[in-house]
Amino acid sequence: MKARVFVTLKPSVFDPQGHTIVEALHSLGYGRVADVRQGKFFEIDVDAATPAEAETLAAEVADRVLANPVIESFRIEVAPPAGARP
Amino acid sequence: MKFGVVVFPGSNCDHDAYHAAKHVLGQKAEFIWHKETSLAGSDVVVLPGGFSHGDYLRTGAIARFSPVMRAVREFADSGGPVLGICNGFQILLECGLLPGAMLRNRDLKFHCEFVGVRVERTDTPFTELCTLGQVLQIPIAHGEGNYFAPPDVLKDLQDSGRVVFRYANAQGETTDEANPNGSLDNIAGICSEGRNVVGLMPHPERACEPVVGSKDGLVVFESVVHALSSRGALEAASR
């Protein structure tokens, strides 16, 4: 089962990369882009029987390794198994 | 006295630390591969600078899972002096031996230059021969040395006197201009609650001989030799 993990800097932490990107966008004329936050995206394939189990496992991995809880937070999406009816 | 210099895949200041300990100070020194599970009887452990595991994921994030780190943690917990330099500091942050985290430098540039580093505390084994407020001229070389800690952690560090080094100008003023990377409160180095684990971004091991432009970093290594010698003398006297 595929779990997607999105890791971003916490809102309270300054993101120098996002800041630089938004400045570049403004110089290109995209004045309507108010802010950019850069993050990381992981797609992990887990051996789990249910989406809930996959999410629990992904959350544990994200908390222990993929994200640094001091500066980052994460969000998880579990894709429905192939062939599953929506 | 034996310095154990841990070598991770991607460490590149391991030889500098070894050289400072062995050839400049005349102490014993040994490289310890990160797969080892013991510290080979080291009296001081150095986690050197570099790009362990290619800085993949985050700086120091993979190195903290190396087998040797369990031994480093036990050594630190039992009061052994541990010095984390640059990437070594980042590893200490990732493994939780020191609090906080590193962000990209605020200007997103890799800084490789001499900076002023003011000694804020002389009550650690790595600074006890320094003079309080002394400004060391030592180099930095990092892209992610922008020290961050949540407000409560930062306050605790300040209140408990655990900020050991701050970036400062030649006059010893901790101005924003003297801050090369945007670190909170100009923090260049901190220590653990027990004061035996010290991490700093500047490279004292690269400034131990006049031929490389400065020997201001040598006092860090001399301090720990002094600290352990006096500790040994005390232990001998109490026997």
Image (spheres, coloured by chain):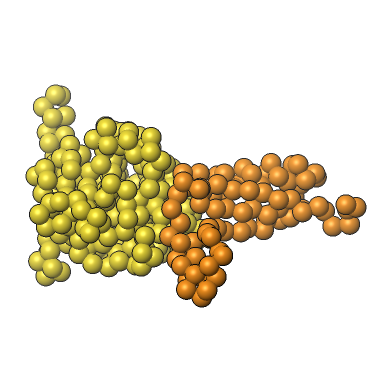
Chain colours: A orange, B yellow
B67 with respect to B90 (left or right): right
Res B177 seen here: yes
Residue B71 in percent (x, y) is at 40, 42
Res B32 seen here: no
Residue B17 in percent (x, y) is at 25, 58
Residue B188 in percent (x, y) is at 26, 51
From the viewer's side, name the closer residue of B12 and B32.
B12
Tell me which corner region of the image, top left, top right, bottom left or bottom right, holds residue B149: top left
Numbered-mark total? 0
Residue at the far top in the pictured view: B238
Residue B7 vertical placement versus B125 (above, below): below
Residue B78 in percent (x, y) is at 32, 33
Residue B35 vertical placement versus B109 (above, below): above
Q: Residue at x 71, y 45 (%)?
A: A55
Q: Residue at x 17, y 37 (%)?
A: B123
Q: Residue at x 90, y 52 (%)?
A: A85
Q: Residue at x 9, y 66 (%)?
A: B210
B17 with respect to B128 (left or right): right
Tell me which corner region of the image, top left, top right, bottom left or bottom right, holds residue B77: top left
B238 with respect to A58 (left or right): left
From the viewer's side, name the closer residue of B225 and B26.
B225
From the viewer's side, name the closer residue of B87 and B81.
B87
From the viewer's side, name the closer residue of A29 and A5.
A29
